[in-house]
């Protein structure tokens, strides 16, 4: 398999999508089940809600692929064209590719499908999402956090720009600011990990949040560091999903595999928590740290296997003309 050199920035960039996809596929068989025993070894045996083939990833990575394709093909992820491309890709996926889909995302797809292919599709989608939140519909699910990690790849030198993009892409489907704030924190964690090779960026991302929100999120991160992943069993909620993923990452600091397995053991929305954790872990440890058995098995819509996911991630770094990517292939900055 043709992957970037171990320890390189490209290795860590490729690890973002590969880590998410492998975490997703590892969690699929256990979705909505109870927390697993500490000695249980999760395996990519398929099944789940699909039912999925062994190694097949679910909606978490499917939607992340939609985002990554936009980043690869558009120089400015915040342009109207890029946002509409993403919204159209979500609608196309929901109609023809979704193996399962969360309640919030499904409602938004139904409510904005009439705008498919128009120059207003992203605006219509975001407005519908905002309206649901304003009407009191619970809109802080984990469905935007699970997919926004690839955004970091387009903003490796621009944390402020990444924060704006994470917010905008989250609001396409999730009008609750909590979902956007979670995406800002996690995307900054992913960006920092690709560039520097550590996970300090999650806490560093607090500075990118509104000042009056930083204390609340800092306390939630503290709580995650004090408890095991299964403590946050209501992990369909975006805050609990981030806490469960962060608990797994900080609780198993010595490699990709122990931490992604810990994320799966949290129970309930196992594929999503492991996909969220996997994106950060892949950015921290690189694609080279993911076991060959995972890389050989992982696959999914619309036909990607490991090497294709790695190429897509690197394409998201460089953009359509190759000019966006910096620090490519070099050591940690």
Image (spheres, helix red, strand yellow):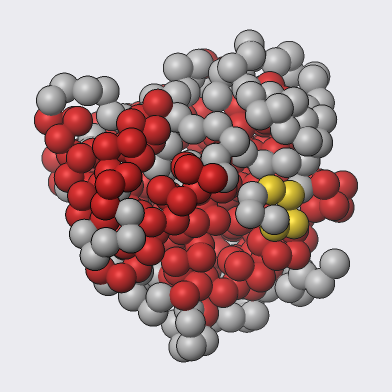
Q: Is residue 162 left or right of residue 133?
A: right
Q: Is residue 23 left or right of residue 292?
A: left
**Is residue 57 among the parts visible in the rendering?**
yes
119 and 281: which is toward the camera: 119
Q: Position of residue 264 (x, y in %)?
A: 66, 28
| Vertical side of 295 occupied by 192: above or below | below
Residue pictured at 47% horizontal, 23% vertical: 235
Q: Position of residue 64 (x, y in %)?
A: 51, 52
Q: Position of residue 236 (x, y in %)?
A: 44, 24
Q: Is residue 75 left or right of residue 274?
A: left
Residue pictured at 26% horizontal, 23% vertical: 138
Residue pictured at 64% horizontal, 24% vertical: 49
Residue pictured at 22% horizontal, 23% vertical: 137
Q: Is residue 97 left or right of residue 299?
A: left
Q: Quadrant of residue 310?
A: bottom right
24 and 128: which is toward the camera: 128
**Is residue 198 among the parts visible in the rendering?**
no
| Vertical side of 88 occupied by 321: above or below | below
Give the residue at the far front of this rendering: 114
5 and 331: which is toward the camera: 5
Counting labels gives: 0
Q: Which quadrant, please, contains the N terminus? A: bottom right
| Vertical side of 65 occupied by 179: above or below | above
Q: Position of residue 21 (x, y in %)?
A: 65, 47
């Amino acid at each position: 398999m043709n992957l970037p050199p171990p320890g390189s920035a490209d290795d860590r960039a490729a690890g973002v999508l590969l880590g998410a996809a492998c975490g997703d596929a590892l969690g699929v068989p256990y979705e909505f089940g109870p927390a697993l025993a500490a000695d249980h070894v999760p395996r990519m045996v398929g099944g789940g809600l699909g039912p999925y083939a062994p190694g097949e990833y679910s909606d978490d990575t499917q939607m992340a692929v939609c985002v990554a394709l936009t980043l690869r093909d558009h120089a400015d992820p915040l342009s109207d064209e890029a946002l509409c491309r993403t919204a159209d890709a979500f609608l196309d996926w929901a109609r023809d590719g979704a193996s399962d889909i969360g309640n919030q995302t499904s409602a938004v797809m139904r409510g904005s499908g009439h705008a498919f292919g128009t120059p207003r599709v992203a605006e219509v989608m975001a407005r519908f999402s905002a309206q649901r939140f304003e009407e009191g519909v619970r809109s802080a699910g984990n469905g935007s956090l699970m997919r926004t990690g690839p955004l970091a790849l387009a903003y490796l030198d621009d944390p402020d720009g990444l924060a704006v993009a994470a917010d905008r892409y989250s609001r396409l489907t999730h009008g609750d600011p909590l979902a956007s704030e979670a995406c800002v924190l996690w995307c900054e964690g992913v960006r920092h990990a690709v560039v520097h090779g550590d996970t300090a960026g999650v806490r560093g991302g607090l500075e990118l949040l509104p000042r009056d929100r930083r204390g609340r999120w800092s306390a939630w991160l503290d709580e995650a560091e004090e408890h095991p992943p299964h403590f946050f069993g209501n992990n369909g909620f975006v805050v609990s999903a981030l806490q469960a993923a962060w608990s797994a990452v900080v609780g198993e600091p010595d490699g990709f595999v122990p931490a992604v397995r810990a994320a799966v053991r949290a129970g309930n929305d196992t594929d999503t928590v492991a996909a969220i954790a996997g994106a950060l872990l892949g950015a921290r440890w690189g694609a080279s740290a993911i076991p060959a058995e995972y890389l050989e098995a992982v696959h999914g819509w619309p036909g990607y296997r490991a090497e294709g996911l790695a190429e897509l991630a690197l394409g998201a770094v460089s953009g359509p003309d190759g000019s966006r990517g910096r620090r490519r292939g070099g050591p940690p900055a």
